Every structure is written in C-alpha cells, then in structure tokens.
Amino acid sequence: MRFLHTSDWHLGRIFHGIHLTDDQAHILDQFIKLIHDAKPDAVLIAGDIYDRSVPPHEAVNLLDEVLSRILIDYRVPVIVIAGNHDSPQRLGFGHRLLAGRGLYIVSQINNGLVPVVLQDEHGPVYFCAVPYVEPPVVREKLGAADVHDHDRAMAMLVRHLKDQVPRGARTVALAHAYVTGGEGSESERPLSIGGADTVDAAYFQSFHYAALGHLHKPQSAGNEHIRYAGSLMKYSFSEAKHKKSVTLVEMDARGRTTYETVSLSPRRDVRCLAGYLKDILAGPQNGENKEDYIMVTLKDTGAILDAIGKLREVYPNVLHIERPHITVGGELHGPGGDHRRLGEVDLFASFFTQVTGTEINRVQEEVFTEIVEQVYRNEREVRV
C-alpha cells in the first residue's frame, strides 16, 4: 500500500497580518498534482486542518475544493483527524455520510472509536486514527478515572483501538500529539499550559507506521517509522530553515515500510535577513525572491527614520524588524532571551515581574494557567 502523509495545513492562517489562503491554495495545487503522479492508495491528514475553530469561509472553500478533487477526480480515500486548532464538532459534521464517499473524518470519541480499514492487493490495513482529545474528555468518555494528562490519554486511546485489530494485521497510527524528543517551533500552540503535554513514543512502536501531526518540522520521533510530516508551509520565522515536505510511504505485504519526502514549492518563502541597512538595501542575492516574507534584524545602532518603509521599497513583504542593539537607559528591557520562544506561563511571569517588581508565586501561576486552559477549551468548544 502506498499513502501520502501530511499534516498541519492551518487553512485560514494569518501571518503577521497577511492572509495566507492564496499561498496555501498554490501549494495545495502542487499536492493535487503529486497525487496524480504518485497514485497513492490513501491520503492521511494528521490534524490542524484549520488554523482556528471557526475558520474563515475562504479556508472552508479551499478545503472543500481540495478534498473534492482528491475524492472525485482521483478516487483516493482520505483519512482526517482533528488537531488542537480544529473544532471537533465542526470538522466532524457529516462524517458518517462522507465515509461512504471515502472521506473518513475522525474528530471525536463520542460515538466510539474504531479503526478505518482499507484494502490493497495483500489484504486489509488497519488505520488507527486518534484525534486530538483533551484528557478530561477521555476520562469521561472511556470511564478512565486515572487519565489526568496527555500521555495517559494517548495510552488509553491507542490500546482501545489496538484491541480491535486482529493479531498480525498491518497497522498504521494517526495521531496529533507532542511526542517526547520532538523538536518544536514557535508557531505551535502548546497542548497544555503549565503541565505535561508530551506523550511517549513507545505507544507507537507496535505500529508499522505512525503518521503524526502537531510539530511543524518534518522529523522522525524515536524511530524511523514514527514520523511527523511537518506543516504544509512555514508559519513562523523560527521555521525559516525548515525544509517543508509531505511524506510518501510504501508498505509491503508484511507491513514493512519505506518512505521518501517530497518537497512542495511555496509561492513565497519565509526568510530571515540580518545585517546593516545599507547592505540589505542592495537587494536580493543568489537569485532569492524579493517577494518572500521576510524578517530583518538590523545591526545598526543609531536611529533610522522609517526603516521598514525603506526596506519595503526593496522587499515588499518585510513583515517584522528587530533592533537588538537599541537599549533604554543602557539596559535591554523585556523578557530574557527570545520572547517568541517563551510559553504563556513564562511570558506572563516575566510581565508580572516587570509590572509589580516581585516574582509570581505558585498560586498566581496556577490561576493564570487555569484561565488560559479555559480559553483554549472554549475555542475548541469542548464540553465535559
């Protein structure tokens, strides 16, 4: 069996005020052409289809167009799971009807969780699809009182699915999770605020392949057959050096898998430039595209009038400027290190200290954590 593994499309994403839907449509058109050329038996999308629980209509229309072409034009089954950015209720609308056309949407565990079974010339392959589900939901739906974190929730869901698979069958896992040892980036929303959000890679060892989503860098997680496909595009400047791709997997009659990564070319790349203003204004080097989305770090120490205006005369899509050498009163102010890489709790703790002059205490940190967790639950419309 041959299948394409992709994830983290984040349709409807806004990047520094720029709506990326046209860029996403450009790269998804290449994805459709890859399906035409590679002729896969299935397409797996491992979560975060949309960038937010209530996506803009342009994003919904784009997904409708892409899935229609895959299912109707090429008759390739698609298995989709919900990620932490998706609304499980909205994404799962009509899933029983759509399964009849080859679109398998697994977004909730309300009505039971069963493997999706697809056939090739060697027999069945069992796709055990685990949507992103918060631990309280697993605790309620599976009656598991001891599920208090993502690791335990994943263990319960994987075991629930594996118990329904015949011994010796070929199996593929789909999951949206932060597997221990994976390398994250700043554009990924944390799965748990101030708590344990990682899961053990050991839960996926018994599968012939594990198609993971959530981390935006393409990478293996503990084993070559446990893999993140990575995001469709670069969604933060911390991803500027990532090589984005989708993963084409081949499975033989015994379940042994091999894979190759297939790169897709964005309409505009995401790049970081650093240097003095006069040098950067000299223009693109080595055939680089001046239309790329760019962050500039200026080494100049003196005042510059309308730096971004000058830069945009050469690079129209300069989206962010940093001036690390500018100081106030001789000292840098703000959180230590790169504030974009700090989690919510650490960023708030730094802000709290600056405003009050005292360190945040444990009780205050717990109150803040619970508020942020509730905001994320409300965004995803989870009811427990």
Image: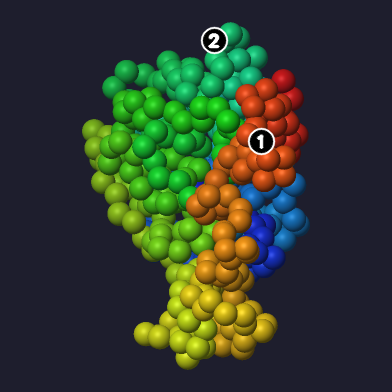
**Along the line of sight, the residue nearer the viewer: 195 or 342:** 342
- Residue 379 is drawn in which quadrant? top right
In the figure, 254 relative to 66: above or below?
above
Relative to 10, residue 314 above or below: below
Residue drawn at point x = 37 percent, y = 85 percent: 286
Kindly indicate the quadrant of the structure image that contains residue 148.
Answer: top right
For label 2, the crowd category at 10 Å Cα-Cα, with few meaning under 14, some 14 to 19 and many 20 or more, is few
Q: x, y percentage for residue 82? A: 59, 38
For mark 1, what is the residue? 358
- First reached walking from the N terminus: tag 2 or tag 1: 2
In this view, the residue in front, 373 or 101, is 373
Q: Residue at x 34, y 26 (%)?
A: 202
Name the residue tied to disc 2. Answer: 146
Residue type of the residue flagged with mark 1: Thr
In this image, 199 relative to 312: left or right?
left
Relative height, residue 255 to residue 366 (above, below): below
Q: Position of residue 151 (x, y in %)?
A: 47, 23
Report the side of 208 relative to 289 (left or right): left
